[in-house]
Amino acid sequence: MKITSLSLLFLFVTCIATANDGYKLWLQYFPFENQAVSDYYRDYLENINIVGTSPTIDVIQKELEIAASGFLNNNVKPSFKHSGDSNICWIGKADDLPADLKSNFGQKLNEIGKEGYWLKYHLGRVIITANSDIGLLYGTFAFLKSIQAREQLERLDVLDNPKIERRILNHWDNLNRTVERGYAGFSIWNWHRLPRHIDQQYHDYARANASIGINGTAVTNVNANALVLTPEYLAKARALADVFRPYGIKLYLTARFSSPMEIGGLRTADPLDPEVQEWWKEKTKEIYSYIPDFGGYLVKADSEGQPGPHNYGRTQAEGANVLADAVAPFGGIVMWRAFVYSEKTPDDRHKQAYNEFKPIDGKFRDNVIVQVKNGAIDFQPREPFHPLFGAMPETPLMMEFQITQEYLGHDTHLAFLAPMYEEVLQSDTYAKGKGSTVSKVIDGSLHNYSLTAMAGVANIGTDRNWTGHHFHQANWFAFCKFAWNPNARSEDIAEEWLKLTFTTDKAFTEPIKKMMLSSHEMVVNYMTPLGLHHIMARSHHYGPGPWVTGGGRDDWTATYYHKASEKGVGFDRTATGSNALGQYAPEIQKQWGNLKSVPEKYLLWFHHLPWNYKLSSGNTLWNGIALHYQKGVEESRENIETWTKMSDYVDEERFKHVLSFLQIQSEEAVWWRDACLLYFGQFSKMPLPAGVEKPAYDLGYYMKLNPKFVPGI
């Protein structure tokens, strides 16, 4: 007998596994809590129609088997039919819908896009339909997530299309398996064993990404090695592409601009040289012979020592277009990074990308999309949105977020990044008046872009739980949610991830959701409050380093950015300073250039102010900085207290692992607070305000700290 109400079923929903190393991510498929819950869902998992045959249909069937095994504790194997419509769960493309369903659904079916799906409860059946097998896969994962969250299936009516066409992970993984800015072990790509050995983790990687809508991956570092374009490595890349294909994931490769010289034997890589143009065309043709659905190239040029068109006096558009012409006949694209700056130290690094790209808006081929970091400096704990967003109506722009935490405490600091992503995406560019948000730039609706994309620099490695910190899985998850829908809400993402990963019990999800949602602001408080930025240690970026100065480039130091002296602190980017603010719309210039209206979170990003400047709270700038640092420390301690109370809801392995990392974070929050306040205090010459703990050591102690073998370089 079917149960149609869940009102009394879920009084006790906590499920604690005896051991859980986190490898399953958000695809835990915990066993049902009791017989009533099992009875409610069992029929939908046992009796399934899947219409069609393809490798992706095979993946769908396999996923349903994995889920049923987990939910029903290995007691049942689903019964699949591949024709007819008698079962109570029906999965098939819209064209294959039974006649009665087609007539009932009518025009609604026309709203389903190429990769979208419709998950619908109708007359006692769950219907999952789409226009493609990949859409069916996404719909199947959505169905299984609803069961994971113990939702009432009778309420299912979800028609969901991705708002961004290309949703891509960027791996900064080297061929020797080191990972630049990676903190979760080595690269999962074992190039030495490929193509002869296909590790199960490659399938699990594709499965996890498909479950949250990723449809592309660039598996090699943007600081590229030309070897990846040689036949030896193309055979290896083909093996990965073959794994990814049934999951709807295309493979992209990073292209080193000087490849025609390094592996092609040419004397130049000048993009206007006919031999160079022909070389790229032949090399690209070769790649497509290995990987017919190759997505295209990702390029970092003229940045941090990478070769590029600057070497030949050419523009970024001229550099990008030679690769674009090569992939165009095959339907490929070029993602050209905007992280470009002069070989000479500029008056303000903030202005470099805008100055480079704004004058060539509209000069790129139609299959080029410019990949722009969320902020103009470099993935700082908080940055205002990049001024290029809204400034290039004739050239598609894509967002580049960093999921790995290069500047946010590496692997041991809890920082749920969804609020940061949301803050940037919902920022108003005013490019076409009020409401011209960054999200509308990215999804193409503001400027009618023909290409749309979002990239995230992955935080994945060989650590058993994939991401080092268990909670950093949530940042991978959150990025993918925003890539699917840039108007998603952080609160919804956090709650969904917690329910899928740990438990649906509100006694756990509510306090931990609150902890997650406030964690990014906490890290900003104890690292870079009130708009301070780029004050981390040199090179490895682990720990504080506001004293960092000198070296090869001034704009790789801390002192270049904070400009602290006895007179004050902060970077004047108004008209009286570098005028980087002039790259934004007039409405933003007016707001952020005025001390009465600039958000205090950006205060020292745009203004150089005296230590006794009065904040809106009434505190002096010095006291405000110090109190923010102290607040961050206190919040890190509160997180330990919150987590300690959760032992009844979490398996012992993950509970202890997270607790250990929270303790490390709290200790290092104190390190950041004490080092920064001692450093800046020598300029302010003002005492610490009441409530701010005194440092345990002097400044010299912190300046001498030199951690060895920090990962990620």
Image (cartoon, grey):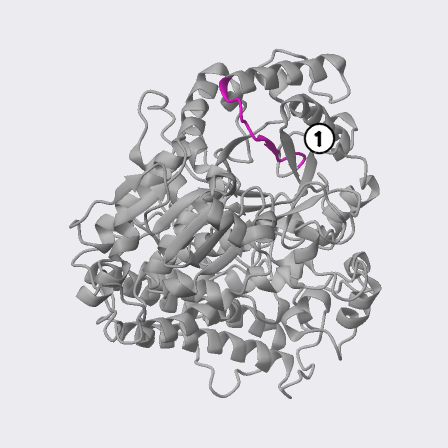
Query: Magenta region, mostly helix, strand or loop?
Result: loop
188 above or below 377?
above
414 relative to 628, above or below: above
Choose between 437 and 97: the one closer to the eye.
97
Q: On the image, numbered disc 1 is attached to which residue?
A: 320
Q: Please tell me how many numbered marks the rendered image carries.
A: 1
Q: Quadrant of the N terminus?
A: bottom left
Q: Is residue 639 above or below residue 291?
A: below
Locate residue 655: give its quadrant.
bottom left
Please state if 102 lies on the left or on the right of 472 as rendered.
Answer: right
**In the rendered image, is residue 602 in sight?**
yes
Q: Position of residue 401 (x, y in %)?
A: 56, 51
Amino acid type assigned to the residue bearing label 1 in the image: Ala
Answer with the quarter of the image where residue 262 lies. Answer: top right
Query: Where does residue 621 sit, x and y in percent of width and height?
Result: 64, 79
Q: Nearer the viewer, residue 454 or 411?
A: 454
Q: Residues within 10 Å of mark 1 (few under 14, many from 20)?
A: many
From the top left corner, tell me how far across and down residue 338 is, in percent: 68, 42
| In-front residue for pair 190/502 | 502
Q: Residue at x 63, y 54 (%)?
A: 374
Q: Is residue 462 visible?
A: no
What's drawn in magenta, residue-wise?
A: 290-302
Q: Secondary structure at mark 1?
A: helix
State the residue in front, 77 or 675: 77
Where's residue 296, x and y in %? 59, 29
Residue 148 on the magenta segment: no
In the image, 690: left or right of 622? left
Looking at the image, which residue is at 36% across and 65% down? 151
